[in-house]
Amino acid sequence: MDRELTAAALAQGDQVVAAARDPRAVAVALPGAADSLPAVPLDVTDQEQAAAAAAAGIERFGRIDVLVNNAGYGLFGAVEEISDAEARGQGPVRRLRVRHRGDQSGDPAKAAAAILRLATEPEPPLRLQLGSDCVSLVEGKLGFVAKEVDQWRAWALSTDFRSA
């Protein structure tokens, strides 16, 4: 979805900074966009790199209006990263993502269009679930949490200074 979101944002005239573990993968994924698409290195587990990536966007464009954290689901350079991923023990996940690329339930182009539309809403959602699989997972989690809160409500409330 990251490639589709980036391409759609560029197509509508938005300015984009792409952050990826290997910024060269951005040029491979979107050939011809390099002049208008600065790419910066970012390993999301490295707070200094995250701060530097945000600073690069501000330095280049003056501000950041929308920030999309697509870590964990992005496919920029997924194929190129498999050998590196093996060294970090993430190879099986990367291979699975590449093998199932294109047969997921969600349409990355539709997701990109939805994100771009929501970016202009005056009150966009704080958390955005896209795709039936994601909605089902969140609904299941919310149901589990609601049941657990109900089950342990009296216990939880008994810890207040003045128990209910």
Image (cartoon, rainbow, N blue to C red):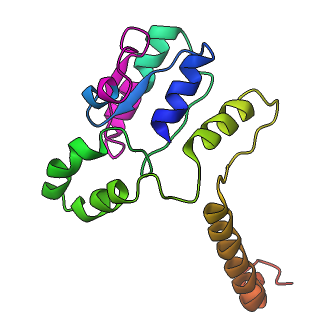
Identify which residue, 160 or 72, lies in the foreground. Answer: 72
Q: Which residues are magenta?
A: 27-53
Apparent side of residue 129 relative to residue 98 in the rendered image (left or right): right
- Say whether residue 42 is left or right of residue 135: left
Q: Toward the viewer: 16 or 3?
A: 3
Q: Is residue 42 magenta?
A: yes
**Image quadrant where residue 135 sits:** bottom right
In the rendered view, does 35 fall on the left or right side of 6? left
* Residue in the image at 22% along x and 60% along y: 91
Q: Quadrant of residue 98?
A: bottom left
Q: How many marks?
A: 0
Where residue 118 appears, x then y in whole percent? 73, 35
Please provide percent x and percent y for residue 103.
48, 58
Residue 35 can be seen, yes or no: yes
- 136 or 79, which lies in front? 79
Whether residue 93 is situated above or below residue 159 in the rendered picture: above
Residue 53 placed where, x, y %? 39, 26
Q: Residue furthest right?
A: 164
Quadrant of the image occupied by residue 125? top right
- For image coordinates 57% across by 26% down, the residue present is 8
In the image, is residue 35 part of the stretch drawn in magenta?
yes
Q: Is residue 127 above or below residue 54?
A: below
- Residue 91 vs 23, above or below: the answer is below
Residue at horizontal 24 percent and vertical 60 percent from the top: 90
x and y percentages locating residue 140 in the rendered image: 67, 76
**Residue 115 vs residue 61: left or right?**
right
* Front residue (pair 157, 65): 65
Q: From this viewpoint, is residue 158 visible?
A: no
Look at the image and tell me in which quarter the C terminus lies: bottom right
Task: Residue at the far front: name it.
Answer: 103
